[in-house]
Image (cartoon, rainbow, N blue to C red):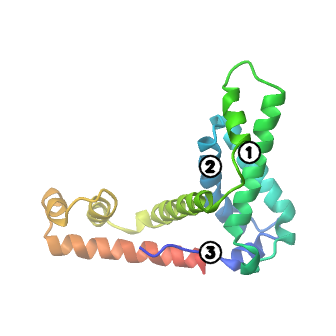
Amino acid sequence: MSEPTTTRPSLLLRLRDPMDERAWGEFVEIYGPLVHRLARRRGLQDADAADLVQEVFRAVAGAIGRYDPDPAKGSFRGWLSTIARNLIVNLLDAQRRHPRGTGDSEIARLLEEQPAPDSQQSALFDAEYRLRVLDWAADRVRDEFPEATWQAFWKTGVEGRPAQEAARALGLSVGTVYQYKSRVVARIRREIERVSS
């Protein structure tokens, strides 16, 4: 399935208006789980990761007016990844300086010893983004399809089951399974294109 490679420029422009609830809602819906997962992978507890997501969005809100969408200066996701990484390091450093009664301070030391983000880390962030957008788009379009259509897509496209097996399980022909899967994939693709164009 085609994945979005950039954040929609119109969304970035709309984020400059702090009162544009729809733009901020869409932004939070797409990027919130992504930043949260990144924080958890870096060793933050769930509550700390949730707080970090809020801090990242606060930083984005304060700096989005200065963000330059020039591709030569890097992508929006790269900029966002840098903000998230810096805030994670700051939080872990603060936790190291003011230790809690529980937790593993070794995590903070390991993170601080990591070099600046490289292409592998950026690739991981981009892969997480693509998965999040796919999940988000699938959730948005799920209710548009009858259960049999969705299950044909899910069993073959997500679970990776052969069309013949899905057809038997659903009591459909193999051709119908392919047709249903194609309809759902096309709709998800349109939803992804809508948010990335």
Element carrying mark 3: loop
Residue under label 1: 88
Furthest residue toward top = 101
- Viewer-side label of 3, 1: 1
Q: Earlier in the sequence, mark 2 or mark 1?
A: 2
Element carrying mark 1: helix
**Residue drawn at the location 81% of the way across and 76% of the way down:** 68
Element carrying mark 2: helix
Residue 146, image x and y in percent?
Answer: 32, 65
Could you give the CA–CA distance between mark 2 and mark 1, rounded to whole angstroms? 9 Å
Residue 22 in sight in this render: no
Determine whether label 2 and label 1 are within 8 Å by CB: yes
The answer to whether 187 appears left or right of 7 in the picture is left
Task: Please tell me which residue lies in front, 197 or 139.
Answer: 197
The amino acid on which the numbered mark 3 sits, given as a three-letter code, is Thr
Q: Earlier in the sequence, mark 3 or mark 1?
A: 3
**Residue drawn at the location 60% of the way across and 52% of the way down:** 33
Q: Residue 38 shows which numbered tag?
A: 2
The answer to whether 191 appears left or right of 114 in the picture is left
Query: Residue 112's quadrant in the figure?
Result: top right
Residue under label 3: 6
The amino acid on which the numbered mark 1 sits, given as a three-letter code, is Ile
Query: Residue 69's quadrant in the figure?
Result: bottom right
Could you give the CA–CA distance between mark 2 and mark 3, rounded to whole angstroms? 19 Å
Q: Earlier in the sequence, mark 2 or mark 3?
A: 3
Determine whether label 3 and label 1 are within 8 Å by CB: no
